């Protein structure tokens, strides 16, 4: 789950395709949505700075208003990278660091690098990491003229294209089993997407929207048209690979087809971005066929169930009494094990026929 959705799919959208969002109304609205710092938070920040254990990660937990007020208290001059209020300039100032990207006049946000293999250089965070048996064959060839030209590092989805994808998301009727992507998908304000949201995007929303934008609409620039077609083909290969891997059934055919589409997708990345270095998540993805043979369908061992429970515990942690901490986790684990034992019991050889009919709903 983490390798495919939070790893490869997110990497594909942010790095292989690339996005560029610049909306005046969004930026102006963002100036008034920064949370105001409380006196308690300001005191915590002062104590952290005086403790000598300050790091960029710890400073990042404070809001922009708190960082700004502490900089004013210490008469520190902060050089902003644009109209939007970003944490990075304040954090670097408080740590006594210099923003190298601003000094170089790169015009980008602080902390970005130009190393094509670096996650920060493309706005990526550290890597955390449906379908049925009757999936039809899809596209694999990606040898497109102009796919690896000098424009390979430029983002391909600008604001207007992202707004079109947002409209498609709003107008799509989907089953309840699919997580709904955020209505502001693609903008900096959508925050961190969950694995279930990336799953929905790669299974339907992103492939369909890219076909509508780049295949069905004419483009006079031949090299741009060929490059767009290469990205669409790579996206479809990734979508097909994930559908084969996450099918409700599995077999050697499922594993072989997953590997075929995943290898085609990885080759497409290297053709579209010749300077890109594949990451550990791409290596891990090539081991999934082995796991399908050892453990069966991925839906039986992926972590969506536990991730939802962890999210529930994190959301309600502040509301729990101290005596509850530990008991809820034990209850969840016991219930999960009991349900697993019940499913195994009703499906055992020699079980009464009536129990076999109940196995599907247990």
Image (spheres, rainbow, N blue to C red):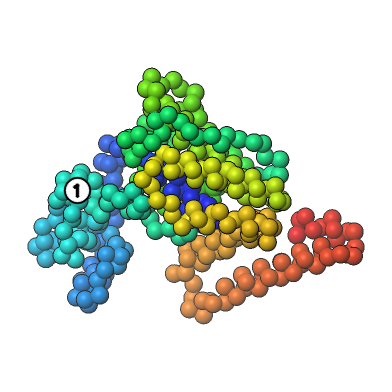
Tell how many labels.
Answer: 1
On the image, the x and y values in percent for residue 151 come to: 33, 35
Q: Front-most of 250 and 99? A: 250
The answer to whether residue 280 is left or right of residue 32 is: right
The answer to whether residue 168 is left or right of residue 137 is: left
The residue wearing badge 1 is: 81
Q: Is residue 145 above or below residue 186?
A: above
Quick one: which residue is furthest to the left in this view?
Answer: 75
Q: Front-most of 4 and 21? A: 4
Q: Is residue 188 above or below residue 58?
A: above
Name the residue: 60% across, 59% down: 302
The answer to whether residue 20 is left or right of residue 51 is: right
Q: Front-most of 134 and 340? A: 134
Where does the N terminus fall, quadrant-wise?
bottom right
Q: Is residue 330 above or below residue 250?
A: below
Name the residue: 38% across, 36% down: 148
On the image, the x and y values in percent for residue 312 come to: 52, 63
Name the residue: 71% across, 44% down: 133
Name the residue: 66% across, 73% down: 334
């Amino acid at each position: 789950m983490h390798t495919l959705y939070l790893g490869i799919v997110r990497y594909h959208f942010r790095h292989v395709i690339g996005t560029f969002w610049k909306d005046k109304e969004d930026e102006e609205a963002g100036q008034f949505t920064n949370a105001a710092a409380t006196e308690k938070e300001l005191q915590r920040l002062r104590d952290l700075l005086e403790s000598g254990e300050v790091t960029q990660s710890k400073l990042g937990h404070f809001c922009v208003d708190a960082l700004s007020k502490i900089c004013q208290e210490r008469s520190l001059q902060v050089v902003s990278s644009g109209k939007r209020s970003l944490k990075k300039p304040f954090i670097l100032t408080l740590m006594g660091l210099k923003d190298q990207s601003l000094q170089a006049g790169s015009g980008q946000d602080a902390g970005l690098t130009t190393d094509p293999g670096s996650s920060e250089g493309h706005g990526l965070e550290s890597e955390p990491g449906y379908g049925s048996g009757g999936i039809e064959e899809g596209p694999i060839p990606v040898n497109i003229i102009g796919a690896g030209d000098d424009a390979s590092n430029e983002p391909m989805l600008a604001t207007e294209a992202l707004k079109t994808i947002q409209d498609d998301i709003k107008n799509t009727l989907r089953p309840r089993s699919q997580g709904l992507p955020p209505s502001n998908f693609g903008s900096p304000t959508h925050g961190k997407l969950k694995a279930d949201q990336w799953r929905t995007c790669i299974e339907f929303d992103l492939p369909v929207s890219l076909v509508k934008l780049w295949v069905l609409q004419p483009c006079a620039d031949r090299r741009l048209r060929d490059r767009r077609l290469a990205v669409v083909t790579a996206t479809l290969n990734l979508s097909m690979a994930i559908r084969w891997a996450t099918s409700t059934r599995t077999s050697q055919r499922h594993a072989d087809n997953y590997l075929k589409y995943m290898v085609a997708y990885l080759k497409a990345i290297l053709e579209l971005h010749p300077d890109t270095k594949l990451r550990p998540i791409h290596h891990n993805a090539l081991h999934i066929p082995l796991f399908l043979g050892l453990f069966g369908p991925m839906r039986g061992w992926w972590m969506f169930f536990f991730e939802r429970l962890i999210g529930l515990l994190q959301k309600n942690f502040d509301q729990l009494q101290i005596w509850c901490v530990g008991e809820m986790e034990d209850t969840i684990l016991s219930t999960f094990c009991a349900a697993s034992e019940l499913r195994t019991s009703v499906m055992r050889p020699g079980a009464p026929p009536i129990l076999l009919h109940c196995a599907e709903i247990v």
